Image: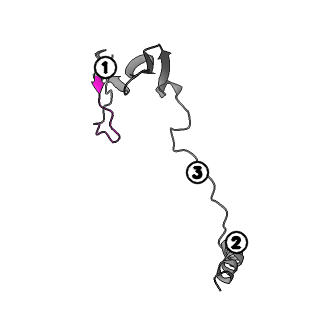
């Protein structure tokens, strides 16, 4: 009896699964205004390796805004330019950090 039940279930599975198959719907088009991809908004990452550390420099539109430093010994840390004035401070990057939204509203 123990061997018969799994065999019956496996035999009935293909017939049961085929009855519920339906074609997938077509992929909807992107929303208006999102058709063109703007590569300038993607961050540019430059990796600089030395014997003592590895630095990953993150830039948007050519402006450096964050540096990830991975020393040869020890944990990695981040230096972030929060105000956009070129002064970098060490940032805590926790698994679930609370970060307020920061947008550039106007620049000249």
Q: Please state if 18 lies on the left or on the right of 82 as rendered.
A: right
Q: Residue 30: where, in percent of width, then height?
A: 55, 44
| Residue position for label 1 | 84
Boundaries of the magenta span: 90-100
Q: Residue 29, position in %: x, y?
A: 58, 47
Q: Hey, which quadrant is residue 85 in on the image?
A: top left
Q: Are marks 1 and 3 in contact (CB under 8 Å)?
A: no
Q: Earlier in the sequence, mark 1 or mark 3?
A: 3
Q: Earlier in the sequence, mark 1 or mark 2?
A: 2
Find numbered disc 2 in the image and state the secondary structure of the residue it sits on: helix
Residue under label 2, please give it: 18
**Spot occupied by residue 86 in the image (x, y as percentages of width and height):** 31, 14
Measured in 3D between alpha carbons, the distance from the residue under mark 1 to the one under mark 3, in whole angstroms, is 38 Å
Position of residue 84 relative to residue 75, above or below, is above
- Quadrant assignment for the C terminus: top left
Whether residue 99 is in magenta: the answer is: yes
Look at the image and tell me in which quarter the N terminus lies. bottom right
* CA gap, disc 3 and disc 2: 26 Å
Q: Is residue 50 left or right of residue 82?
A: right
Q: Residue 53, percent across and down?
A: 43, 17
* Front position among marks 3 and 2: 2
In the rendered image, which residue does mark 3 sit on?
28
Q: Nearer the viewer, residue 75 or 97?
A: 75
Dot 3 or dot 2, earlier in sequence: 2
Give the answer, above or below, for where 54 lies relative to 28: above
In front: 101, or 71?
Answer: 71
Q: Is residue 93 magenta?
A: yes
Q: Nearer the viewer, residue 102 or 13?
A: 13
């Amino acid at each position: 009896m123990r061997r018969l039940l799994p065999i019956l279930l496996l035999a009935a599975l293909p017939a049961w699964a085929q009855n519920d198959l339906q074609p997938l719907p077509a992929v909807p088009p992107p929303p208006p205004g999102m058709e063109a991809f703007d590569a300038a908004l993607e961050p540019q990452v430059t990796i600089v390796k030395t014997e003592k550390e590895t630095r990953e420099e993150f830039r948007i539109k050519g402006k450096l805004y964050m540096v990830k430093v991975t020393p040869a010994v020890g944990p990695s840390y981040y230096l972030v330019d929060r105000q956009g004035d070129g002064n970098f401070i060490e940032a805590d990057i926790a698994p679930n950090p609370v970060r307020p939204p920061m947008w550039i509203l106007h620049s000249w």
